[in-house]
């Protein structure tokens, strides 16, 4: 008992210090949050470094430290195709979408949410685009946020032996406090800190593990003896399954919590630097996660001590590091979880406060009222997501995959065509969102053969086709829309 207590005190101390720091950041950001635009988009004043690490940290979430290492630990290097697809998708998103979306959301009546951008970009007088896209956000972020909360509960339960429900309540409470207080700035600043912490942990853990095993040759040799197929990226995979795994990259074009970082960056001129920082962070982080799972095979498979593959990162930390260092590194897992949940809560809150409350209930509501409505909806959504996360057996990677596919298929094609195609119309955008979202939901319910393909790929393809077809129905865009498109086009040359 004393040995366990000595281990838990350093872990608990580092966790408490970290959590207090996040709350203090929220209190500091509270001073700069005066209007709804500040609360939802930070007044469009993020620097390149903050925008880059905030986008990366809010994007990667707990799956980077739990889901991806767990997948590699369970199946081997054939899981790297997810990372390859994500890297390609993220680069294309930064290279081709970021600057155009930053310019377009400002030109299109200073849109501060994705639903508002769709409505303003296509001059939708019916509000159908705003309502449907807000509903899609609320639907899929429910699963995404629940995935993060399951990961948070698993972390506390595994580290401290705390009962899952209590662990879930602790994690959710801290995230709610700083998000509720500081809004977008608090979320972005804490994401910046969390991104650095995640990066350090993902480099340090696999390096120390490989060194402990005697070096890379010894590690690879041990894995080869235990699981020969784990060394081969093409083991037990077909072209069909590789395409399905790489299709994860398509999701980047439609993730609201990533796209809002593009919208909030201080100036389009900051985007090249942000792209370099963000992509460098991402490549090293993904490699770290992959090699953590790979080295974990050699470390644990011989002893058979690891029951849940998604705990391999945490198990290596507790096995190899001094308790004080372990506390700091395990805080990286909490950082990954928190950095995504806070962004999801904020985007969901904006969908309710800006896209429903202000649009339909109180069109003349002042900024102070809207900020407090936003805070209230953060609290409500957070509580609801916590209730959904009460099932501790849900797999983090599965929940994230479903939500990722939903956003990628529903919003990705509309975002791309809205900034690149003059001919896109309101009818096409609405059809694309509906077809993409419905395809993901239906495809996920079907099994066998072609339906085993990751649902984002058929959803993205059918959503794109729906936009191209229905944009031909109801006439071409108005002269005002075309002038606006040309203004953005000229600005990006």
Image (cartoon, helix red, strand yellow):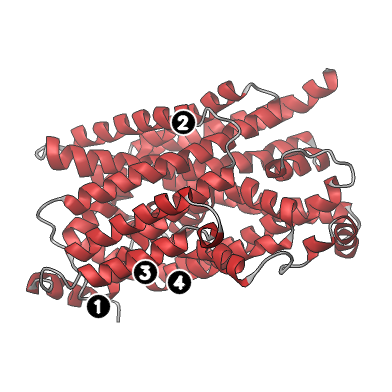
Residue at horizontal 77 percent and vertical 38 percent from the top: 318
Residue 271: x, y in percent? 40, 68
Q: Are marks 3 and 1 in contact (CB under 8 Å)?
A: no
Question: Judging from the image, what secondary structure is the residue with disc 3 in?
Answer: helix
Along the horizontal axis of the image, is 401 left or right of 333? left
When asked about the image quadrant of residue 76, the answer is: bottom right
Q: CA distance from mark 3 to mark 2?
A: 33 Å
Q: Position of residue 57 (x, y in %)?
A: 52, 51
Instruction: Please tell me whether residue 114 is drawn above or below residue 423 in the rendered image.
Output: above
Q: CA distance from mark 2 to mark 1?
A: 43 Å
Residue 327 appears in view: yes
Closer mark to the observer between disc 2 and disc 4: 2
Query: In the rendered view of the protein, which quadrant contains the N terminus?
Result: top right
Crowding at dot 3, Cα within 10 Å, few <14 / some 14-19 / many 20+, comes out as some
Q: How far across and down, in percent of the image, does residue 3 sit?
A: 84, 23
Reading the image, the residue beneath label 1 is: 489
Q: Earlier in the sequence, mark 2 or mark 1?
A: 2
Return the residue at label 2.
388
Q: Which residue is mark 4?
A: 92
Q: Which residue is mark 3?
A: 97
In which quarter of the view is residue 374 placed?
Answer: top left
Dots 2, 4 in contact, CB < 8 A = no
Task: Check contact, mark 4 vs mark 3: CB within 8 A.
Answer: yes
Q: Nearer the viewer, mark 3 or mark 2?
A: 2
The 10 Å Cα crowd at callout 2, few under 14, some 14 to 19, many 20 or more, is some
Question: Quick one: quadrant of the C terminus?
Answer: bottom left
């Amino acid at each position: 008992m004393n040995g366990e207590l000595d281990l838990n005190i350093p872990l608990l101390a580092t966790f408490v210090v970290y959590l207090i720091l996040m709350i203090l950041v929220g209190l500091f950001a509270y001073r700069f949050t005066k209007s709804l635009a500040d609360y939802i988009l930070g007044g469009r004043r993020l620097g390149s470094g903050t925008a880059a690490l905030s986008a990366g940290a809010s994007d990667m979430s707990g799956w980077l430290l739990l889901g991806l290492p767990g997948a590699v630990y369970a199946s081997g290097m054939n899981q790297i195709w997810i990372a390859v697809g994500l890297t390609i998708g993220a680069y294309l998103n930064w290279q081709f979408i970021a600057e155009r979306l930053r310019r377009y959301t400002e030109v299109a009546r200073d849109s501060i949410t994705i639903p508002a951008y769709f409505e303003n970009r296509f001059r939708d007088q019916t509000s159908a685009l705003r309502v449907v896209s807000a509903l899609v956000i609320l639907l899929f972020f429910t699963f995404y946020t629940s995935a993060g909360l399951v990961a948070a509960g698993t972390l506390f339960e595994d580290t401290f032996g705390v009962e899952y429900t209590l662990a879930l309540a602790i994690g959710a409470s801290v995230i709610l406090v700083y998000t509720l207080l500081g809004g977008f700035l608090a979320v972005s600043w804490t994401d910046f800190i969390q991104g650095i912490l995640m990066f350090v942990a993902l480099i340090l853990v696999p390096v120390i593990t490989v060194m402990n095993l005697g070096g890379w040759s010894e590690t690879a040799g041990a894995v080869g003896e235990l699981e020969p197929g784990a060394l081969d990226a093409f083991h037990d995979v077909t072209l069909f399954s590789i395409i399905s795994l790489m299709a994860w990259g398509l999701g980047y074009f439609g993730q609201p919590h990533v796209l809002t970082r593009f919208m909030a960056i201080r100036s389009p001129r900051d985007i090249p630097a942000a792209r370099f920082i963000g992509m460098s962070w991402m490549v090293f982080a993904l490699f770290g996660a992959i090699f953590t799972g790979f080295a974990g095979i050699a470390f644990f498979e011989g002893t058979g001590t690891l029951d849940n593959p998604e705990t391999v990162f945490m198990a290596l930390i507790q096995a190899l590091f001094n308790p004080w260092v372990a506390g700091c590194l395990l805080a990286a897992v909490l950082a990954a979880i928190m950095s995504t949940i806070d962004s999801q809560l904020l985007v969901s809150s904006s969908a309710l406060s800006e896209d429903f409350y202000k649009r339909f209930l109180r069109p003349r509501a002042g900024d102070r009222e809207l900020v407090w409505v936003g805070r209230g909806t953060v609290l409500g959504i957070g509580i609801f997501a916590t209730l959904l996360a009460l099932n501790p057996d849900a797999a983090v990677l599965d929940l994230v995959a479903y939500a990722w596919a939903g956003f990628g298929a529903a919003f990705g094609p509309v975002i791309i065509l809205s900034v690149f195609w003059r001919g896109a119309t309101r009818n096409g955008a609405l059809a694309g969102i509906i077809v993409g979202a419905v395809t993901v939901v239906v495809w996920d319910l079907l099994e066998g053969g072609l339906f085993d393909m990751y649902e984002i790929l058929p959803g993205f393809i059918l959503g794109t086709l729906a936009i191209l077809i229905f944009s031909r129905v109801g006439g071409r865009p108005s002269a005002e829309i075309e002038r606006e498109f040309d203004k953005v086009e000229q600005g990006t040359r």
